[in-house]
Each structure stands twice: as structure tokens, then as C-alpha cells.
Amino acid sequence: MTKSLDFYFDFTSPYGFLASQTIEDLAKTINQEINWRPFLIGAVYKEFGGAPLNNPMKFDYFKADLDRSAKLLGLNGFTWPDNFPGSPIPASRAFYWIKAQDTEKAAIFAKEIYRAYWLDGCDTSDPSHVVKVAGALGFSEEDVMAGAQDEDVKNRLRLETEAAIKLGVFGSPFIIIDGEKFWGNDRFDQIIKLYG
Amino acid sequence: MTKSLDFYFDFTSPYGFLASQTIEDLAKTINQEINWRPFLIGAVYKEFGGAPLNNPMKFDYFKADLDRSAKLLGLNGFTWPDNFPGSPIPASRAFYWIKAQDTEKAAIFAKEIYRAYWLDGCDTSDPSHVVKVAGALGFSEEDVMAGAQDEDVKNRLRLETEAAIKLGVFGSPFIIIDGEKFWGNDRFDQIIKLYG
């Protein structure tokens, strides 16, 4: 059985976006599957304390760092969304609804939502944009819209976020492999050295 | 003329320690000299907001991350000092006194102070330990002890810290190359890609 790593991320997290576009190469290199686990960073920050990206004195640095990091990863067109940070809730709920139908499509959906937000300037806080991304993957937009309002799906997102907090996930992206924790896409090199 | 990069660090910073032991390889790779610029992280945090390492809920992660990062860099024996964070002031003042005599020895002194604190558990908040490190490099311990109390030296450290803050240096280590800012030793790979 192939082992798997847990990939925790928030859909409004720019470093999460970078990780989402490169983690499949990482997983292939270390021969593991990926558990895609979106959670709500707002709840995490309430528990662990605020994010550096919220600090106006550091914001210019992070914007420059992300722009540079995206370019170096070949992710051209990285643009700061007008509505940052927006809300990750519609995309996260749609993700868990899709995941219940098709795990592979859920992973593609996650990557596409991230690209819509961080490359195409699409407002993924708006459910009508979220369902379009799902629609392009063959789902009925109406089904996704209704499914994302399902109580089980809402609960799933709540439970996933609580479980992440309990495990000590305090930022996005966050990867756990065999209980070993890695915060940030700048730990990919270490993961490859340790598990590759 | 060889170009130079500015290396900002605080002597109590564990990630600064990691950077101090590897930055010469980096500088060689990109063919630049290093300006070693110790500053006081406490003053920086007052300006920009607190450090993640001060957050008790994240502390276990950072300890594990540092231990792992040190091992992967071949820095065996990394140990969390009993008196962390202690004070960087005695070592920083001694550094600027030494630098006024001998720039190369100042760089060696910086690396040795870091090793004393992070590998040997030596209390580098204590001036008597600091001057021993300088003594091993051929300086008179009495001269260093007196020099570190010199008003010019105290002023130099204050001005260096103020200048770092003005430039937006909000953490340790922090590297500036041609005005481009890099926070963290996990940006070394990017520096090599861009300037190597």
C-alpha cells in the first residue's frame, strides 16, 4: 500500500497556492499519496495567534517574496487578489462535497480553485465562481451549490479544522508525514532529503 | 570590486545560527563578500510585532524544525540553550569592537559565538564568556571587555539596529542583496538561483 502524506492548506493562503501547484511532484518523488485537507486558517489563527501576512509592516515583503517565489517555480501571472484574504469557506465546502464523490477530482478542483484565485483574479469567495470551477470538471453546478450547503459537508469542514488545530497545524501550507511536521512550502527540500 | 551582501542577524536567533554556518558557502557560490551585521532582535520585534518563537503553542514545532534543519545541514549537536533567548548585547557590542580592528576576525568571532551558544550551551549573555571567544582569536580579553563598553561601540550597535529597522529587517536572519530582501535561511536556494 502506498503511504500518504497529509497536506493542510487554506484556499486563501498564497503559500498554500504555491504548495498546491508543486506538491504532486514532491509526492511522486517520495512515492506517497496526498491527502488534500483544506481547513479554515481564520479558526487556526484564533487558536494560535495572528498571521504575519496580516502585519502591514511586513506585507510588502511577503508580496515581493511570493511574487519571486511564484516566478522561480514557473507560476507566471501571480497576482495579488483585490479581495484578499476573502473567504475560503465556499471553496472548502465544495471541496469536501466533491471529495465524497471523487477524490481525484477533488484534488484537481483544489488546484484549479487556487489558480482561479491567485493567477486569474477570480473571486473564489463567491459560491457562483466556485461552482463554475467544479462545473468545468463535469459536476452539475446546481448539485455542487446545494451540496456545499449540506449539513454533513459543513460539519466535515468544521471537524477537519478542529482536527488540524488539535494536531498543531498553525499555518498554511502544513504537511504531516508519519507524524513529522513541516510548515511552509520552503520545507519541500527537507522532505525530499528525508523521504526521497 | 567584489559585490557584497548584507547579512542581518541576532546572536540569540537559532535560524540566524544556521545561516551563520552556511552563508560563506552561499557567498562563495554567488561570488559576493558578506557584510556581517548583528542587530538587536528585541528592538525589531518592538517595531514590527512579536516573534513566532515566543508563541508557546508553536514552540515545540520550531524546536523540532531547528533540530531537523541543523542535522540536515550537518550541524550536529544542536541544543536548545537553557537561558534562551538570553541577551545578544554583550556579543553584539564585542563584535563591533572587533570589527573596528579586523573585519575577517569579526566574521570568525560571529560564527564562534553562535557555535558556543547553540552547540556548546555556553551562556553568551555573559560578557565573561564572550571575551573568552574573542581571546581564542588572539584578542586581549581585557581589551574586548573594555572595548564593548565604549560609547562609540554601544552607539554603533544602536545605529545598526535602527538602520536595519528602517530598511524593513523584521526577523533574523535577513539578507539584502542589491536592495532585494530575503528573510530566513530557507531562502538560500532562491538567492543561488537568482545570483548564482
Image (cartoon, coloured by chain):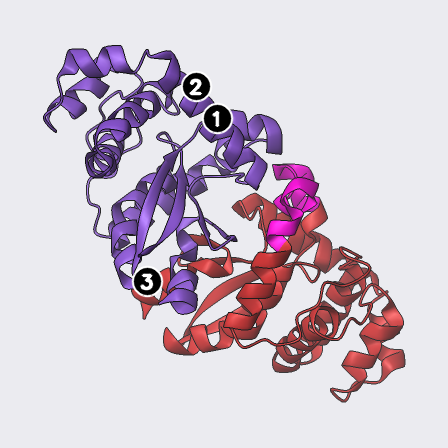
Chain colours: A red, B purple
Q: Secondary structure at mark 1?
A: helix
- Marks 1 and 3, the one that precedes in the sequence: 3
Q: Which mark is residue B30?
A: 3
- Is B16 left or right of A101, judged from the image as shown? left
Q: Are marks 2 and 1 in contact (CB under 8 Å)?
A: yes
Q: The numbered mark 1 sits on a residue in which chain? A: B
| Residue holding disc 2 | B155
Three-letter residue code for mark 2:
Asn
Q: Nearer the viewer, residue B182 or A193?
A: B182
Q: Position of residue B114 (x, y in %)?
A: 27, 33
Residue B77 in view in this figure: yes
Q: Secondary structure at mark 3?
A: loop
Relative to A103, does residue B79 appear above or below in the rendering?
A: above
Q: Which mark is residue B159?
A: 1
Relative to A184, does residue A192 appear above or below in the rendering?
A: below
Helix, strand or loop: magenta stretch: helix
Report crowding for label 2: few under 14, some 14 to 19, many 20 or more residues within 10 A (C-alpha).
few
Q: Position of residue B53 (x, y in %)?
A: 48, 34
Q: Is residue B103 magenta?
A: no
